[in-house]
Image (tube, rainbow, N blue to C red):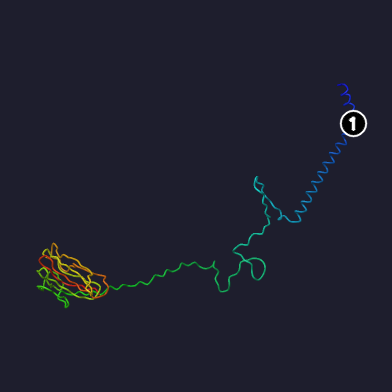
Amino acid sequence: MPGTRGTRWTSRLPQAVAATPWLLASVGVIVLLLLLVKALVAVLGHDRYAEHGAGSRSEAVMVPGVPVTTAPASATPAPSPTRTRRTNGGGTGVVPPAAGRTPVASRSASPSASVSPPTVALTPPPVTLLNDDAPGITYRGRWAVSRNRPYGDHRDDVHYTVHDGDSFSFTFTGTGLDYITSRDPEYGDADVWVVDAGGRPVKQQRVSARAHRYQPQQTVFSVQGLPVGQYTVWAVKRGGVYFQVDALRVRG
């Protein structure tokens, strides 16, 4: 019944009022106990920190999803590679250089002097210029000699022929030979070749002595760079009116 319920709560109100101080006192005791426990924890933690020193604390950064790894802040750094322990006592330091030796850092970096290899002077082989009447030149056929020529020939003379098939030969020792003659509109062609001491061909060439005007002392055939040895040169007239020999240049 409504009236009865209200009367019941009214009758209990003095009891609740009387119990309030005890309830507040209990809450206060609980709060004091919590504060006391917190103070004890703080004191104990401070004592442990003071016992081990500030360098023994470990600090870590909390990253979600990443395990926390702590490392002592006072980890001893690895010794520098440029420093080492002295042999006469503890501690580290730079080892002094041995007596009589210059430290590497103080050595002067002078540029190394370049040494040029010795230059070997190549001496050209001796050259001998032989006139057309030199001993050893053999003429075959009907050759003639023209002397005291005012045309600029070597020693002002030449051997010449007008017959095809006439030839000359010469045996020499050396590394090469030049055949020197004149050029002219009336001068023709010749076959020239060189063989070694065993008769093996070294070089063969058809040369021409034709030119639009007279030109003395012209090299129309040349062979060079042969191994030093004995060789023979032949030349045979093949055409034109005249075929001349002015000089031979032998290279030793």
Q: Secondary structure at mark 1?
A: helix
Place of residue 22 in the rendered image (x, y in percent of width and height, measured from the top left): 88, 36
Kind of residue sitting beneath label 1: Gln
Query: Along the line of sight, which residue is nearer the eye, 198 or 120?
Result: 198
Question: Which residue: 90% across, 31% down?
Answer: 15
Is residue 146 visible in the rendered image? The answer is: no
Query: Where does residue 220 sit, x and y in percent of width and height?
Result: 18, 67
Instruction: Tell me the quarter of the image containing the N terminus.
Output: top right
Q: Quadrant of the C terminus?
A: bottom left
Task: Please say if 57 is above or below 211.
Answer: above
**Rendering coords of residue 129 (x, y %):** 20, 74
Whether residue 96 sits left or right of residue 25 in the image: it is left
Q: Residues within 10 Å of mark 1 (few under 14, many from 20)?
A: few
Q: Is residue 71 left or right of residue 166?
A: right
Is residue 15 something that shows in the picture?
yes
Q: At which x and y percent is residue 11?
A: 90, 27
The part of the image, by quadrant, that contains residue 146 is bottom left
Say left or right for 78 vs 37: left
Q: Image height check: is 105 above or below 10?
A: below
- The residue that label 1 is drawn on is 15
Tell me the quarter of the picture where residue 87 sits: bottom right
Tell me if 72 is positioned left or right of 130 in this view.
right
